[in-house]
Image: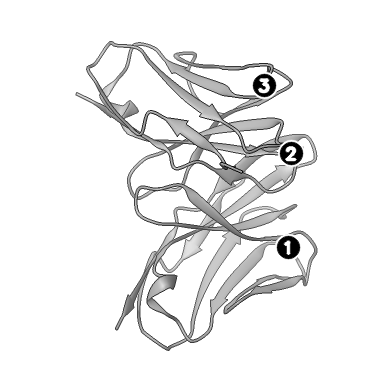
């Protein structure tokens, strides 16, 4: 079965600094989603990547899917307190597989 | 647009009891997925409903069952509750295979 590994598990970053979160899959990714979660709350959709080499940006957050489609990275530029939370990557299992498999999450803390 | 709504917000039950959680999808969405999220972990897929039928099921026992109504809203039922069922239960809706929009979740505590 497919597994997603996120790194690091947690991250403490000084406000204004850049950071990167990684998501590595044990199998080829057919669709990779990035979500953000505030503690104990629902998930907020950030971005979806489908094509190898694809890169998307929203405000100060950029996500990439590598050419081999087995790893994605999420990069935050000039971090702000509003970026604090848990970042989760989720992946589709394939054409006939509707479920999303999830990583364990990366907890991001922004130090003022 | 109200987005995805879930009820109740919090719930406390005792072992052996039964619980029903409810979800209303975002307007225009026809697919509802349910997830269980234990503290400090990613969500685990329970099942997905489409056209009032369970389209796919994750690795959860038969104690977990669901339903989707003609208006696309959905219920998650859990029978014979165990301590290990304590978790945040998330509902997500989507249109076909587009990105999923999540509700705020229901926090279930089993004592």
Residue at image x 50%, y 50%? A43
How far across and how far down the image is residue B86, in percent?
A: 30, 30
Of labels 1 and 3, the one closer to you: 3
Report helix, strand or loop for mark 1: loop
Residue at image x 56%, y 30%? B24
Proximity of marks 3 and 2: CB atoms separated by less than 8 Å: no
Q: Chain of mark 3?
A: B
In the picture as drawn, the residue positioned furthest to the left comes out as: B111
Crowding at mark 3 (Cα within 10 Å: few <14, some 14-19, many 20+): few
Residue B59 visible? The answer is: no
Residue at mark 1 to residue at mark 3: CA–CA distance: 37 Å
Report helix, strand or loop for mark 3: loop
Residue at image x 45%, y 16%? B77
Task: State left or right for residue A6 relative to residue B94.
Answer: left
Task: State left or right for residue A112 relative to residue B63.
Answer: left
Where does label 1 land, which residue? A69
Where does label 3 land, which residue? B71
Residue B45 visible? The answer is: yes
């Amino acid at each position: 079965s497919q597994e997603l590994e996120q790194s690091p598990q947690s991250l403490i970053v000084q406000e204004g600094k850049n950071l990167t979160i990684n998501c590595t899959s044990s199998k080829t990714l057919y669709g990779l989603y990035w979500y953000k979660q505030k503690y104990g709350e629902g998930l907020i959709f950030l971005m979806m990547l489908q094509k190898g080499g694809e890169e998307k940006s929203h405000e100060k957050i950029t996500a990439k899917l590598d050419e081999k489609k087995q790893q994605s990275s999420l990069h935050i530029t000039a971090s702000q307190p509003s970026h604090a939370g848990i970042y989760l990557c989720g992946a589709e299992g394939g054409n006939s597989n509707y479920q999303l498999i999830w990583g364990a999450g990366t907890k991001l803390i922004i130090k003022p | 647009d109200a987005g995805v709504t879930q009820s109740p917000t919090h719930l406390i039950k005792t072992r052996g009891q039964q619980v029903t959680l409810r979800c209303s999808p975002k307007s225009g969405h026809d697919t509802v997925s349910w997830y269980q999220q234990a503290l400090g972990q990613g969500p685990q897929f329970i099942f997905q409903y489409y056209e009032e039928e369970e389209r796919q099921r994750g690795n959860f026992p038969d104690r977990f069952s669901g339903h989707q109504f003609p208006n696309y809203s959905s219920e998650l039922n859990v029978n014979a509750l165990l301590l290990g069922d304590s978790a945040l239960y998330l509902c997500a809706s989507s249109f076909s295979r587009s990105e999923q929009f999540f509700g705020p979740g229901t926090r279930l505590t089993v004592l």
